[in-house]
Image (cartoon, rainbow, N blue to C red):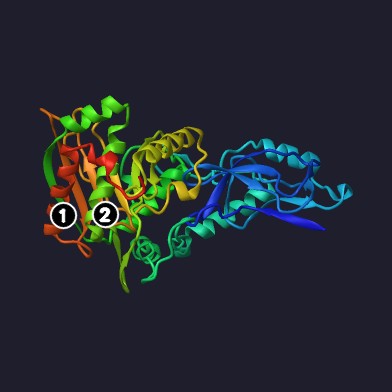
Amino acid sequence: MTQAVTMPALSDTMGAGRLVKWTKKVGDKISKGDIVAEVETDKAVMEVEAFEDGYLSGPLAAEGTEAPVGQTIGFIVDDKAEISGGAEAKAEAKGTTKSAEPPPSVSGDGHAASASVTQSPVSAVLAASIASLRSSPAAARPSTPPKGAPASHEAPVATPQAHDRSATANPVMAALHAGPPYRMEKLSSMREAMARNMIASLTTPTFRVTAQFPIKALKEAADKKHLSLTLLIARACALTVKAMPIFNAVYTPNGLARRDRVDVAIAVDLPDGLITLVLRDAAERPMALLVKDWQALREKVDKRRLKPEEYQGGTFYVSNLGMFASVHNFDAVLPVGAAAILCIGAGKDGRASFTVTCDHRVVSGADGARFLQTLEQYLKDPEKLFTEGTQQ
C-alpha cells in the first residue's frame, strides 16, 4: 500500500509551506513518528513526521519548492519492492530551482518577458496548486485559540477572513510598465504573512493617544537586574491591562469577546520580516518565569524553531523602537484580534514617547488616556513589576 506524505497544516493560518529539506532519502526505512522533512511556514521551520511505517518513495517534491497544505510531496510504501522514482527522486530532492514560481525575466522597457521554464511533474503540480490557492479568498483561514488557552464562554473571536476577502477582491497594482526596468523577487513566507495580516487590519477603525513618560527608574531597574527593557514594559502593559480588562477584549460581529488571561505579544525584528513572541499569562505569572520564557523564545527565534502557539494568539501587543536613537515617536498597525498595541520611541532627556493605538469599536479616547495614566504608575515604580500578580 502507498501512503502520501502531504504538506501539513502546521499552524491555523498556514495556507502553503516551503520544503526546506528532506531528512530521509528514497529507500530509507521509516517508522511512525520519524522526521522525514523540514518545512518553512510563515514564521518558522518545523519538522514533518511520518504517520505510517514503511519506506520513503519518490517522486519527492524538490527542496525549495512550495506546496499548499494537503498537497502530496512524497510517498511511503509498505514494501521495499514498491519503491519508485529512486534516481529521479534524488535529482528532484537536490532541486535545481528554488521556487515553484520562478521570477519572470524582464525586458528593457520594464515588461516581464516570457521565458521557457522546465519543471518536474511534482513541481508543475505544486505551481498550479499554489496559483489556485493564491487566487482564492479562502486562503485566509479562521483563527483558533492556541493550545492551553482557556475556553471562551462568550462569542467566538472574529477572524480576518472577511476582511481579506473585501480588501483583496480588487487590489490596486503598481503601474510598473510606466517606470524603469525591474525584476520580480519572490516574497519570503514571513513577508507574505505580514502582507496578509496588514491587509486584514485595514478595516479596523483606530485612534491613537500619545504621552511622554520618564523612564529613568525603569532603565535603572533593567540594568540592575540585567533584564530587557522591552520585557519590563511588556510586564507593565500586562498589569495595566489587568487593571483595565476592556483592553483585553476583541470586537466580533456578535459582541465583545472578553479574554480571561493577558497574553502579551512583543514585536521582534528579523532579517526577512517581523514576528511577535507571546508571553502567556503575563500579568499573573511571576516575573522570573516570564524572563525564562523570553530567553527561550529568543533562542528559538534565532534557530527558526518557534511553534505556532509561541507567536500566535496575543491579546495585547508591544512594539519598541527605542533602540533607534533618532526615532522618538511612531505608531503601529493594530493586529487583528487585539484592542490595542503600544509603541515606544527612543528616550530623550530621560523621557520617552508612548503611543497606544486602539480599536475604537472596543475602547474610547478617554479609555486610551486612562490606560496611559495607569501604565505610567508602573513605569515610575518598577518594583511593582516584580511584586504584583497572584501566582507569586
Q: Which quadrant does the N terminus fall into?
A: bottom right
Element assignment for label 1: helix
Is disc 1 in contact with disc 2, using a CB cutoff of under 8 Å?
no
Residue 76 image offset from top left, x and y in percent: 77, 51
Mark 1, Cα crowd under 10 Å, few <14 / some 14-19 / many 20+, is many
* Extreme residue toward the right, this view: 81
Q: Quadrant of residue 229?
A: top left
User: Which residue occupies the foreground of this view, 165 or 303?
Assistant: 303
Q: Earlier in the sequence, mark 1 or mark 2?
A: 2
At label 2, the amino acid type is Lys
* Extreme residue toward the bottom, this view: 254
Residue 332 visible in the displayed image: no
Residue 294 image offset from top left, x and y in percent: 40, 37
Residue 275 image offset from top left, x and y in percent: 39, 43
Mark 2, Cα crowd under 10 Å, few <14 / some 14-19 / many 20+, is some
Q: Which quadrant does the C terminus fall into?
A: top left
At label 1, the amino acid type is Gly
Say left or right for 52 vs 283: right
In the image, residue 38 above or below residue 299: below
User: Which residue occupies the foreground of this view, 70 or 323?
Assistant: 323
**Mark nearer the viewer, 1 or 2:** 2
User: Which residue occupies the foreground of this view, 162 or 242?
Assistant: 242
Residue 253 image offset from top left, x and y in percent: 31, 72
Element assignment for label 2: helix
Residue at 44 percent across and 59 percent down: it is: 145
Say left or right for 194 vs 326: right
Task: Calculate the distance from the C-alpha at mark 1 to the C-alpha at mark 2.
Answer: 14 Å
Q: Which mark is residue 56?
A: none
Residue at 18 percent across and 29 percent down: it is: 326
- Residue identifier under label 2: 242
- Residue identifier under label 1: 368
